[in-house]
Image (cartoon, rainbow, N blue to C red):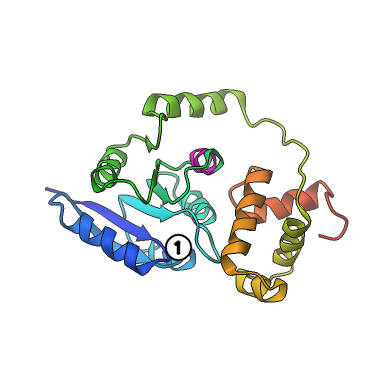
Amino acid sequence: MKKINVFLVDDHEIFRNGLQQLINSEPDMEVIGEASSGEDALLQLESLDADVIMMDIRMPELNGLETSSRILAKNPKRRILFFSLFDEPDYVAAALEMGASGYILKDTSNKIFLNAIRTIYQGKYYFIGEVSDIIVKKYLDARHNNGNAPMQEISLSRREEQILRMINRGKNNKDIAESLQLSIRTVETHRMNILRKFQVNSIEEAIEYCKTNTLWKEL
């Protein structure tokens, strides 16, 4: 019997270890690799054939949305299952829109974790709450038929605009945190909010939109 090859991406080692033990205890699946950052995941997945990629949505430096966007840009058939402590609709919508196959919460039961992996491996979708496979398909069909809606006027906070400008100048999360005397997690939260407001999957897309539409004179 072929096992489901799972790849784990999360910056918390204890959580990764626990999830790895859970998955490897099942006869039909195994963890073939793990990464503590988005950059490490991108590097390893160049040579690993993972059936399901389990991705933390919030990580320092390169978050789960941006990492997954790059993964799917190279191979749209990759199956990505997001897991997070947060069940905010914006996160779920962003994951769905970028092409993820599922989204579950970190504090859910072991049974749901395993069921989500098996469901996604079968080519289906697995989202939290009331979002069923049928609803997801209808959403994707609607977007395919109607196209992307025009982007509305975007209003960033002073701090978000400040951080976006620093990213455009080549600063990473650590540099920004030290310069603004913030935690790396706080900077990451601002990045996530920027992605949500621009309705894009990567910070590069947000910067490109600003430049193309002359949103700011000196971005």
Q: Position of residue 160 (x, y in %)?
A: 72, 57
Query: In this rendering, is residue 61 above or below 52?
Result: below
Q: Position of residue 155 (x, y in %)?
A: 77, 45
Q: Quadrant of residue 20?
A: bottom left
Label 1, secondary structure: give it.
helix
Query: In this rendering, is residue 154 above or below 64?
Result: above
Left or right of 110: which side holds 127?
Answer: right
What's under tag 1, amino acid-wise?
Leu
The residue lying at 56 percent from left, 28 percent from top is 143
| Residue 90 in sight | yes
| Residue 78 in sight | no
Left or right of 115: which side holds 215?
Answer: right
Number of numbered tags placed on the structure image: 1
Residue 92 in the magenta stretch? The answer is yes
The residue lying at 27 percent from left, 62 percent from top is 18
**Magenta-drawn segment:** 91-96
Q: Quadrant of residue 21?
A: bottom left
The residue lying at 76 percent from left, 43 percent from top is 154
* Quarter of the figure that contains the C terminus: bottom right
Left or right of 87: which side holds 126?
Answer: left
Say which residue label 1 marks. Answer: 42
